[in-house]
Image (cartoon, rainbow, N blue to C red):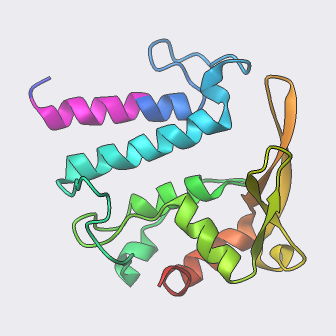
Amino acid sequence: MNSENEKLEKAKTMLMKIVKGVDPLTGELINEESFFNDPRIIRCFYFISEVLDNVISGAYSRTFSRFAEFIITPEQKVKVVITEGKIGVNEFSRCINECIDANGSKKLTGVELNKKLKKRGILSEQPTPDGKTKTVTNEKSAEYGFEMDKRSFKGVEYEAVVINNKGKKYLLDNIEAIMN
């Protein structure tokens, strides 16, 4: 590879293959029991992917808060391609971040989007047995296109908040107001 950016792009490509459950070396599906399919690992890889995007675009900041606000123009919004099927907030954020100007806008993150949706009463928090909290739907969620979906990792079932087509449209139509 000729440049550092090419190496970074290659690293990001390999990382995103893993996130999608594909072995980047062989192209085969990663075994469902693999730690690579653990939602915590996937969230971590999405974060690393965002950092790589910032480094590649030259917008890297040690504090990761170079810009105070999220900005998306109508022209950028039209270019957003949202993944098919029910998706989580991290995947929605990734789709948005592919179209915004990293040199002029704060990146959208699933954590920040969840916080804003909770503030609006669209999502809620629920305590877990280990003393932490998890994001869950509430009586208003379905109205906005959010639902709980059963998932499985290493034979352990868990529920995750997902965004259906109605929710994707709501988020895309209102993303500026939600984030600012």
Residue at horizontal 57 percent and vertical 54 percent from the top: 90
Residue at horizontal 83 percent and vertical 50 percent from the top: 128
Residue at horizontal 57 percent and vertical 53 percent from the top: 91
Q: Residue furthest left?
A: 2
Number of labelled discs? Answer: 0
The image position of residue 26, as x and y in percent, is 49, 12
12 drawn magenta? yes
Q: Is residue 127 left or right of residue 47?
A: right
Residue at horizontal 71 percent and vertical 71 percent from the top: 167
Q: Is residue 146 above or below residue 19?
A: below
Q: Is residue 173 above or below residue 162?
A: below
The majority secondary structure of the magenta stretch comes to helix
The image position of residue 84, as x and y in percent, is 65, 53
The image position of residue 79, as x and y in percent, is 42, 68
148 drawn magenta? no
Q: Residue furthest top?
A: 26
Residue 124 found in image quarter:
bottom right
Residue 122 found in image quarter:
bottom right
* Residue 82 in view: no
Q: Is residue 161 left or right of residue 110?
A: right
Q: Is residue 23 left or right of residue 159?
A: left
The foreground one among 114 and 3 is 114
Q: Residue furthest right?
A: 139
* Residue 68 in view: yes
Residue 14 found in image quarter:
top left
Q: Is residue 62 left or right of residue 23?
A: left
The image position of residue 109, as x and y in percent, is 49, 60
Q: Is residue 22 above or below residue 58?
A: above
The foreground one among 148 and 78 is 148
Which range of residues does the magenta coloring cover?
3-14
For the N terminus, the image quarter is: top left
